[in-house]
Image: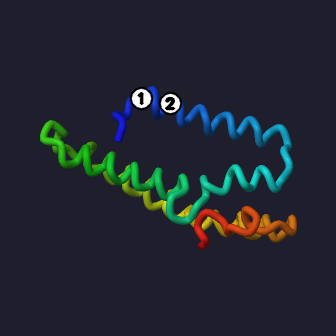
């Protein structure tokens, strides 16, 4: 795996901002759904990935020997974990895509199925 840097993560967030800008231009709904579909995948989408990232950050902070053992530190770790649970609950957003496809009468990415279905 290539080394991660703040710049690589910044590039990722810029790409997401570009997607948001594009969606504000009122693209064709089928195209918009296809672009957003990977973000809301039930297993690998943003809610799940960001929740996992927050849990990993909480663990890294908690297990680091230099982390002060204070009530405030414990509270911050708890807040990270709470936010992770709240984000993980959003994994059900992938069902919204199914409903939107039904609304527009389109099937998931032609005959191959969507990214979470065989």
Percent coordinates x, y for residue 14 in the rendering:
59, 32
Q: Is residue 60 above or below residue 17?
A: below
Percent coordinates x, y for residue 96 in the rendering:
71, 65
Q: Residue furthest top?
A: 7
Say left or right for 105 vs 50. Answer: right
Q: Tell me the quadrant of the picture where the N terminus can be found.
A: top left
Label 1 secondary element: helix
Foreground residue among 46 and 31:
31
> Which label is found at residue 6?
1
Foreground residue among 113 and 22:
113
Instruction: Kindly indicate whether the residue at mark 2 contacts the one at mark 1 (C-beta within 8 angstroms).
Output: yes
Q: How many marks?
A: 2
**Which residue position holds label 2?**
10
Percent coordinates x, y for residue 67 in the rendering:
18, 39
Say left or right for 76 vs 114. Answer: left
Q: How is the image coloured?
A: rainbow
Q: Residues within 10 Å of mark 2 (few under 14, many from 20)?
A: few
Residue at the spot 41% in from the left edge and 57% down from the top edge: 82
């Amino acid at each position: 795996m290539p080394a991660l840097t703040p710049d690589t993560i910044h590039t990722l967030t810029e790409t997401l901002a570009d997607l948001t800008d594009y969606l504000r231009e009122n693209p064709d709904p089928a195209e918009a759904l296809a672009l957003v579909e990977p973000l809301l995948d039930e297993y690998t989408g943003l809610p799940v990935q960001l929740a996992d990232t927050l849990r990993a950050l909480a663990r890294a902070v908690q297990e680091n020997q230099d982390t002060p053992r204070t009530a405030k530190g414990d509270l911050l770790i708890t807040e990270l974990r709470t936010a992770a649970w709240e984000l993980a609950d959003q994994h059900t957003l992938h069902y919204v895509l199914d409903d939107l496809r039904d609304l527009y009468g389109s099937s998931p990415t032609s005959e191959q199925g969507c990214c979470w279905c065989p």
